[in-house]
Amino acid sequence: MCGFLVKDSPFNAATWFLLANDPIAVDPWRSFGAWIRQPPAAAGDFPFTHAHNGKKLYEVCRDVPRIAKMMNEGIGRDIWLFSKALLAKCGSHFNGLKSIVDVGGHTGTISEDLAEAFPGIHCTVFDLAQVVSPAGDVFQEIPPADAVFLKVSSSRSYDTPSHNMKSHFFSSFNACSGYCATGATNHV
Ligand SMILES: C[S@@+](CC[C@H](N)C(=O)[O-])C[C@H]1O[C@@H](n2cnc3c(N)ncnc32)[C@H](O)[C@@H]1O
């Protein structure tokens, strides 16, 4: 446990611990009773959105710099580790690609590691305006590339868009010659 809280450890998860105990993360649990007792929830109404005036996590990040900072730090550390494992275990999947778009690619750690391992691949990092610039919304557009790299989160309370995500993604993927979608994480 302590190894995960040591400041300079590559496995430092202290930011997630702080975030999990921030009022923004705790409030959904405080109002959980009221949420579960109400009539069946409308689409997009989850404990998190219910506690935050309908806002999803990334909308809260946009409006609350403290949360954006913790999210960016936590995600940055996770990606660092994930990127090493990705290249060690699945690096061969990227052979032969000329371009790739890293959807929800945060500040570009995976793209940097990919570009170093495969100097011939042109990597585009695609994320929200509070993270990168130029930015975009994956539910509006995905820039064209040989392959889309998307690490999927099954989070319901945070990210689920109100419109049909699957058909949008698959039509975007059809515009590419290949795609790579990896990973799955769960949030309450
Ligand atoms: C959990 S992080 C995952 C980062 C990285 N791809 C990984 O796999 O570790 C999710 C990323 O998706 C971005 N994101 C969330 N909603 C998005 C949207 N609608 N369009 C583009 N990026 C989005 C967030 O800003 C965040 O950087």
Image (cartoon, rainbow, N blue to C red):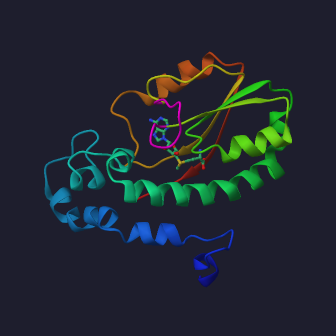
Magenta residues span 128-137
**Residue 185: percent from left, percent from top:** 54, 53
Q: Is residue 157 magenta?
A: no
**Residue 107: percent from left, percent from top:** 59, 45
Q: Residue at x 34, y 44 (%)?
A: 59
Q: Is residue 135 magenta?
A: yes
Q: Residue at x 57, y 49 (%)?
A: 184
**Residue 154: percent from left, percent from top:** 48, 47
The front one of 71 and 94 is: 71
Indicate left or right for 125 with 159 as reference: right
Q: Is residue 184 visible?
A: yes
Q: Residue furthest bottom?
A: 2
The front one of 161 and 37 is: 161
156 lies above or below 99: below
Where on the picture, by quarter, is residue 125? top right
Where on the picture, by quarter, is residue 114? top right
Prevailing secondary structure class for the magenta stretch in the rendered image: loop
Q: Residue furthest top?
A: 175
Locate the C terminus and report the quarter of the image it occupies. Answer: bottom left
Locate the N terminus and report the quarter of the image it occupies. Answer: bottom right
167 lies above or below 111: above
**Residue 73: percent from left, percent from top:** 54, 59
The front one of 177 and 58 is: 58
Q: Residue at x 20, y 58 (%)?
A: 36
Where on the picture, by quarter, is residue 180? top right
